[in-house]
Amino acid sequence: MQRSAREWEDGGVSLPPEHPLVTGVTQSSPLITAYRGTRPERTPVWFMRQAGRSLPEYRELRIGTAMLDACLDPAMASEITLQPIRRHGTDAAIFFSDIVVPLKQAGVAVEIVPGRGPVMGSAVRTAAEVDALVALDPAVLDDTLAPIREGVALTVAGLAGIGDGRTPLIGFAGAPFTLAAYLVEGGPSKDHLAARTLMHADPASWAKLMAWCADVTGRFLRAQVLAGASAAQLFDSWAGALSLEDYERHVAPASRAALAHVADLPVPKVHFGVGTGELLGAMHRVGADVVGIDYRLALDEGIRRLGGGVPVQGNIDPALLAAPWPVLEAHVLDILQRGTAAPSHVLNLGHGVPPETDPDVLTRIVALAHDWQPA
């Protein structure tokens, strides 16, 4: 449900007085304006995975440092987050971290294996294994997130010295289903069969697992917002494997619970999933203010499925980043025009930046979006 300007102003009392939204630093930025349902003077643009593998300065900085170690090094995480803002001039930074960081900090054995992704020490597939996992107290996580809070604070301070100083930081977390899928599968999976089997074979254990994941990831998201993030995005990377019925019955309650951790905070909440064209309305109803649409669905069709009144984010096809510029330019312009069907639109990728992307291409897209005006 869209909120009025008054509701945004009075919608929360829990942000620290130095928070960028409280001081007004990011309040009128193009990104926050668009997230709140008003079309700003220019279309804001940022890219998922903009901080990372496509930037040579990132690869140089990361030499000799494992992914999760980088995420938990406040100075390094902050510097990586700031790199694309300096290079591309995007309208938002997204905090450099990983969705499995809260699992690790809560006591789960997990590592990120290069070329593969998050791998668990052991899979969680039986009722006993679920019970052993949920016995880990999520409240312990709050004390272990000091590196995240420090990294966010350093990043917010760094953003104040770039450009006009109004660039907001987006905090992010993995949605409960995606975290649960990693836990049940033991690592990445193409079809998430084990997770979907547990969902139906033992719905009580599945519900316990999802509730625990919602608490853990929700606390992670809240920590970032309280430390200075001006928006919050929940990623459901694997929800596209679900039917709408399964999503609404077995997943949506946990996603709603995750977002409830920041429901009292007056920041825009964004929900994005991969391959979730059939789930958009349900994803919006869990408590999101903005819905991200991936590249598999035409942006204006996604807007129509959401009812036409929801701010949207998306949805450049990452594959076209390597296409000749005239092809990519036409694609971006088409998306910008389709985005006029929504009350506001944030230009983004319909997933993440491929590591082989030429960074100069991203800079050109930012300039194109900033110069573009609706027909």
Image: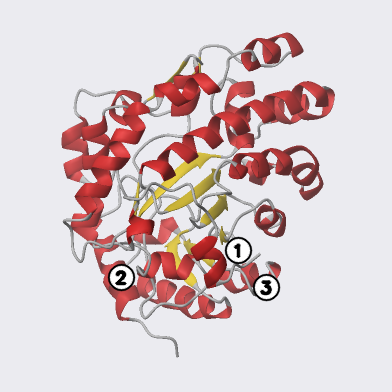
* x, y percent for residue 215: 60, 31
Q: Quadrant of residue 22?
A: bottom left
* x, y percent for residue 326: 33, 75
Callout 1: SS: loop
Query: Residue at coordinates 57% horizontally, 12% vertically from top-left?
Result: 122
Judge the density around disc 1: few (<14), some (14-19), many (≥20) Cα neighbours within 10 Å: some
Q: Distance between the residues labelled 3 and 1?
A: 11 Å
Q: Please identify the quadrant where the C terminus is shown.
A: bottom left
What amino acid does circle 2 point to?
Answer: Trp
What amino acid does circle 1 point to?
Answer: Leu
Sequence-wise first label, 1 or 2: 1
Q: Please identify the quadrant where the N terminus is shown.
A: bottom right
Query: Residue at coordinates 31% horizontally, 68% vertically from top-left?
Result: 365
Mark number, residue 297: 1
Mark number, residue 67: none
Q: Nearer the viewer, residue 67 or 96?
A: 96
Q: How far apart are marks 1 and 2 (CA)?
A: 22 Å
Left or right: residue 193 versus residue 238 is right
Q: Nearer the viewer, mark 3 or mark 2?
A: 3
Q: Mark 3 points at which residue?
A: 304
Q: Do the residues labelled 3 and 2 touch (CB within 8 Å)?
A: no
Q: Which of 337 and 16 is in front in this view?
A: 16
Q: In which quarter of the image is residue 196?
A: top right
Callout 2: SS: helix
Q: In which quarter of the image is residue 227?
A: top left
Q: Name the residue under label 2.
A: 325
Left or right: residue 130 versus residue 204 is left
